[in-house]
Image (cartoon, rainbow, N blue to C red):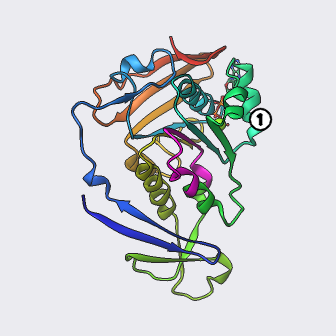
Amino acid sequence: MNKSKIVIHASTYCLSMPLIQSEHKTEASNTERVTTGIPGLDQIISGGFPKGSITLVSGPPGSGKSILCGQYLYKGIEEGDRCLFLTLDKKVEGLLAQTDELGMNFQPAIDKGQIKFLFLNINKKLIYETMTNEILSGDYERIVLDSITPISEMPIYIKNHEITDNINIIDPEESTDKTNFPIRRLHLHYIMNALETSNCTSLVTSELPPNSTNLSRDGFSEFLADAVIILNYDSTMDRRKLSVMKMRSTKHTLKPQDIEIGYGGLKIV
Ligand SMILES: Nc1ncnc2c1ncn2[C@@H]1O[C@H](COP(=O)(O)OP(=O)(O)OP(=O)(O)O)[C@@H](O)[C@H]1O
Ligand SMILES: [Mg+2]
């Protein structure tokens, strides 16, 4: 496998990790599967998410992204997997209150250390270090990142126009030199690479504006992810839908599936 190195320096941290080129991923014929926890979903994707894959879950506000992610980890707990829920949108308490109302009580697993919920404040400088250290700790089989949108929208500033093996990231306030320029996609590469390197089976959410036909908010993460699931609703018909738009090593329908959210979470009906 051709691996190059990406070294990121900032005033507060210095991280180094392998950059795995997406074209070098192998298409295994007998792909191991990881159960989704969503009733009806495993049946339409050959038994579950491909082991070690990254699935992008995109949808407008209230479409069920966080609930689906909660169910995925709740199923993981049942199967003895160690789980990590990284949340950038909501404080952990709000998340737990919603899942608890739907019959998913995470507290016993939190107390046992089988699952960790971590709120990441996008305004904190050490967010990358905290996030990647946790992802690459080797402590988890299932990871959720909810959501990637605030990360993808935060510009970072680098010192050189050329992206070479060594990239110098600097603080925005230092970017007075005309040669400094903000880049956005590096964030996504960086996070996706960390998830891929971890060998965990991951879900990453992306917030879509209502009625959007895009597969992600940033227009790029769908290419980096191994799979894309779109959640949507038709408010006039009071209907919810789930569509599998992409999943490597998997034969699947593109047809939108009717779903419901109720006790237990989200299910295909
Ligand atoms: N107890 C419940 N019973 C039925 N439906 C519920 C219940 N709790 C939440 N919902 C539905 O789920 C929606 C919230 O789902 P979720 O938080 O997963 O959405 P989301 O896609 O993550 O939204 P956002 O982008 O705002 O984070 C609510 O708007 C509501 O429609
Ligand atoms: Mg959410």
In the depicted structure, whether residue 94 falls above or below residue 12: above
Instruction: Look at the image and say whether residue 15 sits in the magenta stretch.
Output: no
- The residue lying furthest to the left in this view is 29
Mark 1: few/some/many CA within 10 Å (<14, 14-19, 20+): few
In the depicted structure, whether residue 82 falls above or below residue 86: above
Q: Which residue is nearer to you in this view: 7 or 212?
A: 7
Q: Where does residue 194 sit, x and y in percent of width and height? A: 47, 55
- Please name the residue shown 50% across and 10% down the image: 269
In the depicted structure, whether residue 126 falls above or below residue 58: below
Q: Where does residue 102 sit, x and y in percent of width and height? A: 69, 19
The yes-or-no answer for disc 1 within 8 Å of ligand 1 is no
Q: Which residue is nearer to you in this view: 218 or 174?
A: 174
Q: Give the range drawn in magenta.
A: 133-150
- Please name the residue shown 26% across and 53% down the image: 23
Task: Inspect the image, locate mark 1, and give the three-letter code of the amino acid beneath it.
Answer: Gly
Instruction: Look at the image and say whether residue 149 sits in the magenta stretch.
Output: yes
- The residue lying furthest to the top in this view is 269
Q: Quadrant of residue 200?
A: top left
Mark 1, residue position: 94
How many labels, in total? 1
In the picture, measured across the screen, residue 117 lies left or right of residue 57, that is: right
Q: Where does residue 45 sit, x and y in percent of width and height? A: 36, 24
In the picture, measured across the screen, residue 251 lies left or right of residue 62, that is: left
Q: In which quarter of the image is residue 180?
A: bottom right
Ligand 1 image-quadrant field: top right
Q: Where does residue 112 sit, x and y in percent of width and height? A: 67, 32
Q: In which quarter of the image is the N terminus?
A: bottom left
The secondary element bearing badge 1 is classed as helix
- Please name the residue shown 73% across and 28% down the image: 107
